Amino acid sequence: MAKRPKSSRRPAAASHERDNPPPDFTEASEMQGDRTGRYLVLMREEEIPRAAAVLNDVAGLKNVESVSAFDTNGSFDAEAAEGAGGCVFPRLGVAVVTGDPDQIGALAVESNEDQGILAIEPERIMYALAEAPGLILPAPPADPDLARNAGGGTLPLEVGTATAQYLRGYRDAVVALVDQLLGGGESEAAIAGLEASRERFVDDAVSTWGLKATRVTNSRFSGRGIRVAVLDTGLDLRHPDFSGRTISSRSFVAGQQVQDGHGHGTHCIGTSTGPERPGQVRRYGCAFRAEIFAGKVLSNAGSGADTGILAGIEWALTNGCRVISMSLGAPVQPDEPFSPIYENVGRRALRAGALIVAAAGNDSRNPATGVRLEPPRPVGRPANCPSIMAVGALDRVLAVGSFSNGGLNPNGGGVDIAGPGVDVFSSWPMPTRYRTISGTSMATPHVAGIAAMWSEAQGATGAALWQLMTGSARRLRLSARDVGSGLVQAP
């Protein structure tokens, strides 16, 4: 096994120690930015009943003990969870509670490890990660004449698709930058030489460029028998490419079914677990024999609160999923610490034999010029947790995607591995059927599908699977800040 670079993160060992001090809850509790007004409470695993009692006794929070996130049949009622005073995810050891600042402040001050409460933080909203900062991918166009054809043609002037005008502007910006650095006259030749020296992967009639670059098309493994959960905007259950597959689905969004009204989830499920032979188009899926668990944790508008995301993780662990793919997140600021709640969820998942893979985020491109920021923006939440595998994005010449976030923040916050994330062709809800988009959201399901292939090949789970993935990655002449251990490779 190849040696890991020093800058790569290892999954953290299980611990009950506080990762960060309790936050200050003295400010007003109304929604601030992407906060919901509810709070996440991390409970010591062996003290969950006692900790739930503390939520009542110390803070006066109602109904926390009596409302579980799941009923005896394993069903999750998102509306009941939102309306209750609190709900508990027993496998994760996390509660979501509603309370005023005084109640939450009292809990933060008076609770300690002996009482079973390890951390408290505000609940936040997370998003399907579009390819440009601040944008959410639109739902499929209503006019079928605007949809991609079966061969994957281009939609004009569409978010998620690079137009000729944009590409010319991007090229001109790069030429101008190189010209400035080299003193003029050499930029076009320098760029031509750089392009000629790089390996370039392309889509063809057989498969997408990403499957070639990751050696998926050379592998005899298919993820057979491995359960892969994709927590996103759901899945188009009527898509013909998934007919006959073993699919379990569940919605964790109040008032919405699993059926994908957005597109992002169907695209990610296609990349991670799409078919080996989709018919009239090239192969675009990695683990084509894996069992699909489609969890809708983001709404048809592309956003969702922590409650639904944690419920999806709980569901995946309860069902024995070895890989949990989350192409979602929220931006963080430089030097902002990672979430102690999600870090402990990542640790507990690893110990249960599951690897959580999450997108690093797409905040690093200048929206005016399209040129990547230097330094890039930090890896977003929750991928910045040390025990969640953070995925950066690469393009066809194995350069860092212009939007892909980097490992800047200390004590976690690094990129662990990279995957194909630019111009990725995959499934999309009908009638569009297929679409090509970009983002660390597209790199993440490549890693998740290949993780299922490695789990089939070696029987590895949890932390051992993490080590196989990073140890076998293709080393690149790029900073570990941007690509971690390198480009993910299939067994």
Image (cartoon, grey):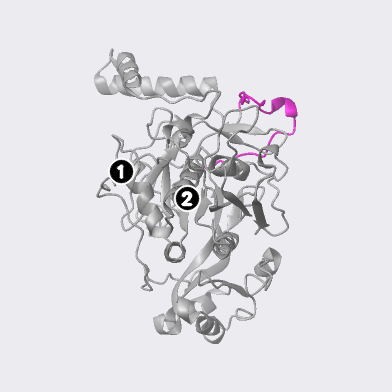
Give the percent coordinates (x, y) of residue 333. 40, 52
What kind of element bears circle 1?
A: helix
Q: Nearer the viewer, residue 15 or 275?
A: 275
Residue range in magenta is 134-157
Which residue lies at the image location 52% right of the left edge and 51% below the top edge?
326
- Residue ID for mark 2: 456
Residue 265 horizontal side relative to residue 343, left or right = right
Q: Which of the numbered marks, if any, corresponds to residue 480?
A: 1
Residue 388: name its quadrant: bottom left
Query: Mark 2 or 1, which is nearer the eye?
Result: 2
Label 1 CA crowd tier, 10 Å (few <14, some 14–19, many 20+): many
Residue 15 horizontal side relative to residue 155, left or right = left
Is the stretch drawn in magenta largely helix, strand or loop? loop
Q: How far separated are the C-alphas under marks 2 and 1?
A: 28 Å
Give the percent coordinates (x, y) of residue 59. 54, 82
**Dot 2 or dot 1, earlier in sequence:** 2
